[in-house]
Image (spheres, helix red, strand yellow):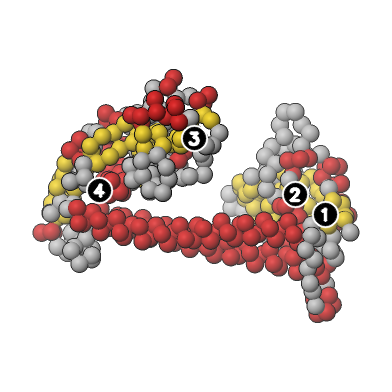
Amino acid sequence: MRDSLEILAKIHYGKSPNEVASVDGNIPIVGTGGIYGLANQSMFEFGIVVARKGSLGTPHLFKVPFWPADTTYAVIPRDDVDLDWLYFCLLNFDLTKLNEATGVPSINRNWLAKTSFNNPGAARQKRIAAILTATDRAIEKTEALIAKYQQIKVGLMHDLFTRGVLANGQLRPPRSEAPELYQETAIGWIPREWEVKDCSAVVDSVADGPFGSNLKTEHYVADPGVRVVRLQNVAEYQYNDSDRAYVSDRHAAYLVRNKVVGGDVLIAGLGEERYPVGRACTYPEDLPPAINKADCFRTRCVEETMHNKFFMLFLNSELARQQIRRYEQGVTRPRINTGNMKRLVVAVPALSEQATFIAKFEAIQAAIQAQQSSVENLFAQKFGLMQDLLTGKVPVQINETELADA
């Protein structure tokens, strides 16, 4: 049986929080994008906030008192409707389909009220909600584990580039305990065995992307073709393979100077608030050759002096970042050119120590990637469950106790 939202819940207009907003409040003020302030009183004790105008994306579930802003609706389930189940129904529905505005996106209350969902009854609502909530908890736990591993990686990289590792794979004692093991250099205190060299001494070649007219959007073709490495593909430590672009084999042959192969270092010549300029990753060994676009530098190191992957790690370290900040230009978005990149001073351990750095990094990175894959699988599982359970495609089995408790 399908029921409209107005049968399942009461739909209230949100209100301006101007009279209740308070920095000392403890009631969340909720807009279309989520919580954005605090109030000293609430409108509702629980419910679901749905965008009325503006960003018409994700609904927000609240099991605590809240104040919905005047750009939202508050959807309050009726007594025989499970709050979590109704939230998942709204989450599974594309709210943007209700937009009829030509300017600022907005949802008409009557259209929202007439939206209908498959209603399996109170007992099955609770069972569906329990299944999907359990999946959400698994996602949250895995994401928390990823955050923990990321913090471990930050600490590890800091220790490696301030203390280095001994032949036995252990960190050197800190400088406060063994000052004789360290030397002061232009880039700070580093282990005494390390050298300090100009970037030009460790880099064999560096290539910016082609001149603008040689590689434009109109040159892109559908796969199959030759991959184009763009700025959005360069994340810190890791190549982002989610946003792909291609050019023809013929055009790629014309841009042979910009060829990228597995193991090459990729450097972002342009940054923004969340993504620092100079961030680096290596191009994956298992991907076919590509070409790099403007503001994305392809770099190869002198093999006898430095491993490519170690150079990538160095560029993401504070030893390099503090130098890059001195050379970056631009007001709205920081930028660095290849000339200034070559002015960097690089810490150079022995190749064997560099290899140990790389091994330690790859171990923690593998752990992070394994958990990221788990999260992706859980999201896919949740999507499938929502499609099956909320639509009634797969009926939910309940026992007599669950039926009696409903």
Please, what secondary structure does the residue beneath circle 2 have?
A: loop
Are discs 2 and 3 less than 8 Å apart at CB? no
Q: Is residue 66 visible?
A: no
The N terminus sits in image quarter: bottom right
Please name the residue that numbered disc 3 is placed on.
225
Q: Which mark is residue 93?
A: 2
Which residue is depicted at the point 44% across and 26% down? 251
Are discs 2 and 4 less than 8 Å apart at CB? no
CA distance for labels 2 and 4: 50 Å
Please, what secondary structure does the residue beneath circle 4 have?
A: loop
Apparent side of residue 360 relative to residue 179 in the rendered image (left or right): right
Nearest the eye: 263 or 374:
263
| In this rendering, the label closer to the viewer, 3 or 4 | 3
Apparent side of residue 190 relative to residue 364 in the rendered image (left or right): left
Where residue 395 sits: x, y (%)?
A: 80, 66
Q: Earlier in the sequence, mark 2 or mark 3?
A: 2
Mark 1 Cα shell of 10 Å, populated few (<14), some (14-19), many (≥20):
some
Nearest the eye: 339 or 54:
339
Residue type indicated by callout 2 = Phe
Mark 4 Cα shell of 10 Å, populated few (<14), some (14-19), many (≥20):
many
The C terminus sits in image quarter: bottom right
Q: Residue furthest bottom?
A: 401
Which residue is depicted at the point 45% across and 57% down? 369
Q: Earlier in the sequence, mark 3 or mark 4?
A: 3
Are discs 2 and 1 less than 8 Å apart at CB? yes
Residue type indicated by callout 3 = Gly
